[in-house]
Amino acid sequence: ITIFANLVYLQNFSVEPLCNNHPLWSLSSEGWFYVIGPLLILAIMRRSPGFFGWALLLTVPALVFFKASYFSPLFGLCLWLAGLVPWFVRIRLPWIVAVLPLAGVLVASRGHLFDSRIVEQLLLAAGFVLLLCSDFANVRAPLSRFGAWFSAFSYSLYLVHMPIVQALGQVMGLQQLPNGRWASYALYFALLAMIVAVAWLFGFVFERRTPELRRVLARILPGAKPTRAEGEPVAGHRPG
């Protein structure tokens, strides 16, 4: 039952995330976002009460299982919807200024200054949205190239980082690193580099095949158009 419920994105509705990979809690919010989000956009663009009604109907289960926790599907759905704001809103604000509220919230969260995790998550989301709505999109290389490199295997990193951490903790016999030691910081960054390397390898084997899979599905599904792979030249244009 747990496996089936996770496959249809019902974790945190009635079952726990699969195994002990707790970061997968957000998949329920993500999966239903891809259903409800487009319906809300269509309702706004076409001014259709029908689309809006379907979106509200599909939100009912999240309302029923709402709890005062950032693991709640409805709360996670709100965080995902916040990611749409930069598509519609632009603020004339230098990114170096817009990043300050986000940095302040991050420092406060690391200092455990928030009594409520929901408040902490909402403030983090608001700070991140403000940054994305600023001129942050105009930031050029090398930061943009660095971000593009990470984005190529970001989903793989999301999937595998917790199992890697748990395996390393089991091998080392540690559940947490000792506080106040320089050796802990050195070991932390060494383990972080190892996690990123393994995630990159996982993404190289699996995630980079996504465009190929899309082309296969486009040939099978009626009316679908093949998508262009990253770096692939557009038809009729020569690469510069």
Image (cartoon, rainbow, N blue to C red):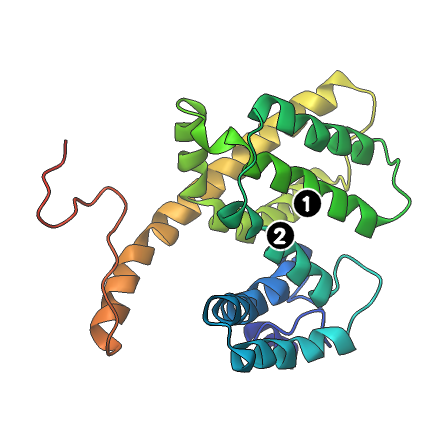
Q: Amino acid at mark 1?
A: Ala
- Distance Cα–Cα, label 1 vs label 2: 7 Å
Tell me if label 1 and label 2 are in contact, CB under 8 Å: yes
Q: Measured along the vertical axis of the image, is residue 198 above or below residue 229?
A: above
Q: Nearer the viewer, residue 132 or 65?
A: 132
Q: Seen in the image, is 115 located left or right of residue 71?
A: right
Within-10-Å neighbours for mark 2: few <14, some 14–19, many 20+: some
Q: Seen in the image, is 19 located left or right of residue 140?
A: right
Q: Which residue is mark 2?
A: 82
Asked which quadrant contains residue 138, the reply is top left
Q: Nearer the viewer, residue 146 or 234?
A: 234
Q: Quadrant of the C terminus?
A: top left
Within-10-Å neighbours for mark 1: few <14, some 14–19, many 20+: some
Name which residue lies at 60% across and 81% down. 53
Q: Quadrant of the N terminus?
A: bottom right
Res 22 visible: yes
Q: Which residue is mark 1?
A: 125
Res 25 visible: no
Q: Nearer the viewer, residue 116 or 90?
A: 90
Asked which quadrant contains residue 152, the reply is top left
Q: Seen in the image, is 92 located left or right of residue 173?
A: left
Residue 30 at what x, y percent from top left? 57, 62
Q: Secondary structure at mark 2?
A: helix
Name which residue lies at 87% across and 41% down. 114
